[in-house]
């Protein structure tokens, strides 16, 4: 049997338009929002599990692909931020198939350094070097970013981890292996300048 809603869950604001809200209304919403934000790591892990039933046609599922990518990143000595980025890099496939890179970057942006966010945002363009010519597209789209301070790292992300990770014989770590790091990173205070723009 479902438990009865708590007093806060049962309460709603009084307003029907934002400019008429009271201090009490917005304090209630803030409290509920903080409770919801605290469960973000659970939702991230659930979304990753959902990649097991995503795009078809590959020899492995999208979940296995991101697990392979994150495993390769970890084995190469990447730090926790980059490993988690590798794990979620295709989390936007279902809802943003045309801009999944930007969606993944937006999800992780409040919690990691700018370099990690930039690499995730650009990985779709950098990955084109491996396949775009087969579709009559420009494989050199990434060249417009040549000279960017993180170009080499984005190239490495795609070359050494992402594009290699479609192998049904590769032994990746399970999602549970990465869970503590997912929880740690997505539980950080959002937009902490010491994290997102370290000196």
Image: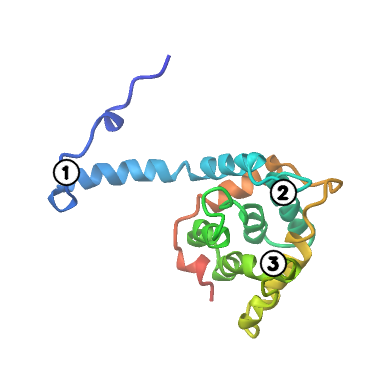
Give the mark nearer the N terminus: 3 vs 2: 2
Q: Residue furthest bottom?
A: 147
Q: Residue furthest top?
A: 1
Residue visible at 23% across and 35% down in the picture: 12
Report the residue marked by disc 2: 67
* SS state under label 1: loop
**Quarter occupied by the N terminus:** top left
Q: Is residue 56 above or below residue 86?
A: above
Give the mark nearer the N terminus: 1 vs 2: 1
Quadrant position of residue 33: top left
Report the residue marked by disc 3: 127
Q: Is residue 65 left or right of residue 37?
A: right
Q: Nearer the viewer, mark 3 or mark 2?
A: 3
* SS state under label 3: helix
Q: Residues within 10 Å of mark 1 (few under 14, many from 20)?
A: few
User: What x and y, as percent, mark residue 98?
Assistant: 55, 59
* SS state under label 2: helix
Q: Nearer the viewer, mark 3 or mark 1?
A: 3
CA gap, disc 3 to disc 1? Answer: 46 Å
Quadrant position of residue 165: bottom right
Quick one: 97 or 158, which is closer to the camera? Answer: 97
Give the mark nearer the N terminus: 3 vs 1: 1
User: What x and y, as percent, mark residue 15?
Assistant: 15, 43
Report the residue marked by disc 1: 16
Q: Are marks 3 and 1 in contact (CB under 8 Å)?
A: no
CA gap, disc 3 to disc 2? Answer: 18 Å
User: What x and y, as percent, mark residue 82?
Assistant: 65, 61
Quick one: 116 or 183, which is closer to the camera? Answer: 116
């Amino acid at each position: 049997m479902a438990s009865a809603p708590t007093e806060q869950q049962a309460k709603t604001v009084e307003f029907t338009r934002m400019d008429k809200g009271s201090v009490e209304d917005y304090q209630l919403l803030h409290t509920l929002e903080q409770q919801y934000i605290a469960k973000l790591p659970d939702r991230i892990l659930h979304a990753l599990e959902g990649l097991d039933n995503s795009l078809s046609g590959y020899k492995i599922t999208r979940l296995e692909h991101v697990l392979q990518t994150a495993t390769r990143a970890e084995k190469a000595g990447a730090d926790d931020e980059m490993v988690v980025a590798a794990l979620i890099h295709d989390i936007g496939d279902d809802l943003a198939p045309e801009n999944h890179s930007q969606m993944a970057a937006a999800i992780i942006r409040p919690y990691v350094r700018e370099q990690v966010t930039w690499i995730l945002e650009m990985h779709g363009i950098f990955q084109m070097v491996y396949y775009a010519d087969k579709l009559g597209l420009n494989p050199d789209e990434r060249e417009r970013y040549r000279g960017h301070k993180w170009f080499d790292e984005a190239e490495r992300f795609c070359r050494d981890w992402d594009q290699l990770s479609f192998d049904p014989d590769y032994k990746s770590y399970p999602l549970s292996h990465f869970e503590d790091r997912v929880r740690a990173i997505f539980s950080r205070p959002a937009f902490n300048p010491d994290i997102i723009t370290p000196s």
